[in-house]
Structures are given as C-alpha cells and as structure tokens.
Amino acid sequence: MKASLTERLRALPFYILPHHGISWVIFKLARIRWKPFKNFAIAVYTRLHSVNLQEAVIADKYGYESLNAFFTRALKPDARPLAVDEDDWICPVDGTVSQAGRIDHGRIFQAKGHDYSLLELLGGDDAMADPFKDGRFATLYLSPRDYHRIHMPTAADLVSMTYVPGRLFSVAEFTVRAIPRLFARNERVVCRFETARGPMVMVLVGAINVSATETAWHGLVTTNGGRIKKYGYKDSEVSLKRGEEMGRFNLGSTVILITTEQFELEPVIQAGAAVQMGMSIGRATIESARDLD
C-alpha cells in the first residue's frame, strides 16, 4: 500500500529531527540503574507496549537493572524451539515481515512506489553485492514489544562486518511507506557470512532511539566519525551455530536477511506476516562449492 497524505505529513518531522542527538539521550537514560527511575521507566514502557514476560528468564519486570536490560531480556531456553529440519533456515528474530521476495537486478522492494539499491545498502561494496543481485531478501521489523535479540538462520562463518553511517529515521510502517530508500539511508551494520549453502548477509538497520547495535563477536558497534568502517574476520575463525545469538538491538528496529537466488522463502514469509525466531524462513536449494569439494 502506498503512503497516504497523512502518513507523508507524519513522516516530515523525521527529516529535521536531530536523530543522533535524540538517540544519544535515550541511550543514556535507558542505562540508568537508579531504582526509582528505572522502575518508573519500565512501568511506563510496559503500559505503552504489551510485553509478554511469561516467556522471559526474568518474569518480574522490575527485576532488571535498567530499562536497557529489560529491552534486551533473555527468553527461557524452550521459548523459541528451532525448526526440526536442519536444512531449514530459521527466522532470526521475532517481529513482522515488512517485505520479502526476489531482489530484482540489484533493487530491493521497500513499499509501493519505493525500492532501493542493494549496493547502497551494503555500503557500496561491489564484491559483496554481486552474488546477491538476483537473490532473495526478507525485511523483518522488530516492534518495541518484541524480543530484541538476533539469532543465526543457519550455521555460518563470519567473513566481514561493515559499519555504514547514516540517518536514524523511524522504521515504523508509515515511515517505510513514506520515506524513499529508508533502509539504505539509515545507519546499519552489514554482516557477511559464508554458510554450507553459499554466502549470506544480515543487515542490522538502526532507527531513532536504536543507535546502539551490538554483535556477539564485537560488542557495541559505535559510530566512526561519519565514515564507513570495515572489519575482516576471515582469519579470526568466528563460527556461529544455527540459532546462536549473533546480535541485539535496543528498542526495535529491522533486520534484512539477504541470500543468493538459490534460496526458497517459505510461502508464509510475506508482507504483514507475524514471525518468531526459530520458525522456518526457507531453505537453500543447492549446495555451495565448498560443500561439494
């Protein structure tokens, strides 16, 4: 659905808001441990957002040391069982499918009337983008009420991580429809992996209030003076298992999973569908050259 006039007007303030300044303030406030403040903040947050704490390791909302600890809460070990078939790649997050489907000659569909460049999304790296120019993608939106940890769709070796600076537009449904190239304009962390079925990329897209992305191997990924920063891991032997935590957000944001064209998304992975970490998102249809050696 194309953005309405009301949605376009609602999105206009995001062009002039001091995104990083607001996010810096929220970053600091969310880490205050003073009990009266953090309990008040958590109480307000849970009134605004319906959070299911029965599946959390700590079910008492006031049992967290800060609002940020509450955001990034762990779930009970059996709360998100993984798809039984090991060949199935699992959904990396809880959330909602924003869009999913085929990458059309290097263009990714955002919303009616809007698409954006895969190359731009990946920070202008031609070599990284080339295997995926006709591939598949799934854009997965995490709302404020969702579980905010990100997990591996399949076992993989980390090849590289790229921090790409940018804006911090909201990634709410109305802004995605109203703001062109939103995901390629926002700050993001691009993680390139090699799996037994070929290459895979996971893009962790920041948003307003969500400028603090963490990865399991690096920790907090901070800004770099407005410059792209690349980290190589080929010699570091960072290997992650299927279902293992690979990162986390504060509040909610978006993960974009990118695969080659030899991948079939599950039919249920379509715009508007609710998803949970651990459910099948699809499977690769051929083995990689590495697997065939």
Image (spheres, rainbow, N blue to C red):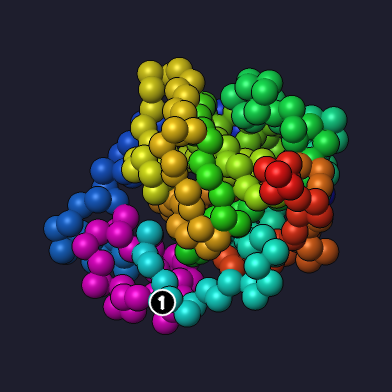
Quarter of the figure with the C terminus: top right
Residue 208 lies left or right of residue 212; in this view the side is right
Crowding at dot 1, Cα within 10 Å, few <14 / some 14-19 / many 20+, comes out as: few
Residue 72 lies left or right of residue 117; in this view the side is left
Residue pictured at 48% horizontal, 21% vertical = 228
Q: Nearer the viewer, residue 289 or 173?
A: 289
Q: Which residues are magenta?
A: 44-71
Residue pictured at 63% horizontal, 36% vertical = 183
Count of numbered tags = 1
Say which residue label 1 marks: 76
Q: Nearer the viewer, residue 193 or 111?
A: 193
Is 54 included in the stretch rendered in magenta? Answer: yes
User: Does 106 appear above or below 175?
Assistant: above
Residue pictured at 24% horizontal, 50% vertical = 31
Residue 29 percent across, percent down from the top left: 26, 48
Q: Amino acid at mark 1?
A: Lys
Q: Nearer the viewer, residue 207 or 229?
A: 229
User: Which image quadrant is residue 114 in?
Assistant: top right
Looking at the image, can residue 65 be seen? yes
Is 245 included in the stretch rendered in magenta? Answer: no
User: Does 221 appear above or below 279?
Assistant: above
